[in-house]
Amino acid sequence: MLWILLAAAAGACIAVQAAANASLRGNLSDVRYATFFSICGTIITAAAVMLVIRPPFPSAAAIRSAPWWNWIGGPLGALIVLSGAFLTPKLGSAAFIAAVVAGQVVCSLLLDHFGWMDLARLEITPGRAFGAVLVVCGVLAVRYL
């Protein structure tokens, strides 16, 4: 249960981040600068953490052997920040986050089902598919009801 609560707290951070980036976009009048400065904050935070905990640097062989998809997290994170800054004012925070969660659930079902990106294979069962349908219905309810 603790892990679920921590994941929910991370979700709350994503909602606050989207609202903060949308507000920054409004103040700077440009979604690109809002994205840039948000990511600068991410880099500064990550650098500070690395300086404090000082983990050992990975070997060159480990870096070279990493599959291509290991390196897309940063660019995808930038797209998420850009999307939040651009779409939150248009959809509202709840609808934006609900749609993000729906996209995460549907994509995650596919990643699990096919075992892509070194994940253990977990079939899409009727129950899991029904859960995803409920999430998508939740998006529609948050946005239109």
Image: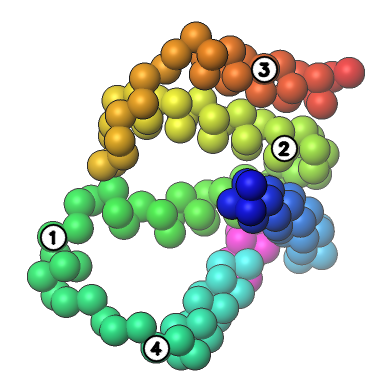
Q: Say which amino acid is labelled 1.
A: Ser
Q: Is residue 36 above or below residue 140?
A: below
Q: Which of the two labelled residues, at mark 2 and mark 3, occupies the earlier sequence position?
A: 2
Q: Which of the two labelled residues, at mark 1 and mark 4, occupies the earlier sequence position?
A: 4
Q: Which residue is mark 1?
A: 65
The dominant secondary structure in magenta is helix
SS at mark 2 in the image: helix
Query: Residue at point 53% right, 86% down?
Result: 48
Q: Which mark is residue 54?
A: 4
Splitting the image into 4 quarters, where does residue 20 fall? bottom right
Whole-number angstrom distance, CA of label 2 to CA of label 3: 16 Å
Q: Position of residue 131 (x, y in %)?
A: 60, 19
Q: Is residue 139 visible?
A: yes
Q: Quadrant of the C terminus?
A: top right
SS at mark 4 in the image: loop
Q: Say which amino acid is labelled 3.
A: Leu
Labels 2, 3: front one: 3
Labels 1, 3: front one: 3
Q: Which of the two labelled residues, at mark 1 and mark 3, occupies the earlier sequence position?
A: 1
Whole-number angstrom distance, CA of label 2 to CA of label 1: 36 Å
Q: Which residue is mark 2?
A: 96
